[in-house]
């Protein structure tokens, strides 16, 4: 699935302005990868190229957003084209409400691959 196809299917699933997360997951053929404190992560279309992040609050998709996706998108926009771009996963787009983000899937690094120095804003780095 290409980014254009993802966008088209996402637009169809969200066409009413008020969308159900389950419909979006189905429309994009999403497969659960894992979750963090505020977001769940899914692969899109059964590939390892793109991911979808859904913001939630304590496991409830219908609660008030805390704008983690919006913040991550703003960081991408700020650092795109800079020396820090290589450290970030590209954010292709977010939904109008910031609840869903479509990104390029990052490759995890091993301890052997970890550089000696990383940008200081990576305060939650995990190996």
Image (tube, rainbow, N blue to C red):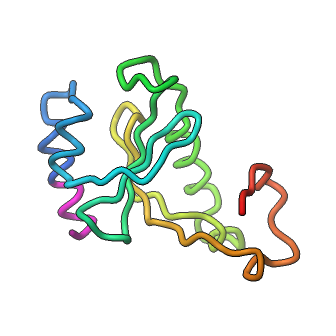
Question: Where in the figure is residue 56, as x and y percent of width and height?
Answer: 45, 29
Asked if the stretch drawn in magenta spans residue 3, the answer is: yes
Tell me if 36 is positioned left or right of 93 in this view.
right
- Which span of residues is magenta-colored? 1-8
Count of numbered labels shown in the rendering: 0
Quarter holding the N terminus is bottom left
Residue at 44% from the left image edge and 42% from the top image edge: 40
Asked if the stretch drawn in magenta spans residue 96, the answer is: no
Residue sitting farthest toward the top: 63
Question: Where in the figure is residue 106, as x and y percent of width and height?
Answer: 52, 67
Residue at 15% from the left image edge and 48% from the top image edge: 27
Decide: is 85 above or below 74: below
Residue at 50% from the left image edge and 41% from the top image edge: 69
Quarter holding the C terminus is bottom right
Residue sitting farthest toward the right: 116
Seen from the viewer's position, the closer of residues 88 and 31 is 31
Decide: is 34 above or below 48: above
Tell me if 14 is positioned left or right of 81 in this view.
left
Residue at 37% from the left image edge and 26% from the top image edge: 61
The picture quadrant where one finds residue 68 is: top right
Seen from the viewer's position, the closer of residues 65 and 15 is 65
Dominant SS in magenta: helix
Question: Where in the figure is residue 89, as x and y percent of width and height?
Answer: 54, 64
The picture quadrant where one finds residue 82 is: bottom right
Decide: is 1 above or below 8: below
Question: Where in the figure is residue 72, as x and y percent of width and height?
Answer: 57, 47
């Amino acid at each position: 699935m290409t980014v254009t196809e993802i966008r088209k299917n996402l637009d169809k699933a969200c066409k009413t302005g008020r969308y159900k997360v389950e419909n979006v997951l189905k429309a994009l053929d999403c497969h659960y990868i894992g979750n963090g404190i505020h977001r769940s992560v899914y692969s899109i279309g059964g590939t390892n190229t793109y991911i979808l992040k859904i913001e939630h609050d304590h496991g409830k998709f219908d609660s008030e957003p805390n704008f983690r996706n919006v913040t991550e998108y703003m960081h991408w926009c700020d650092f795109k084209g800079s020396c820090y771009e290589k450290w970030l996963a590209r954010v292709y787009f977010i939904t109008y409400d910031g609840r869903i983000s479509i990104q390029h899937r990052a490759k995890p690094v091993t301890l052997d691959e970890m550089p000696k120095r990383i940008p200081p804003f990576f305060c939650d780095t995990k190996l």
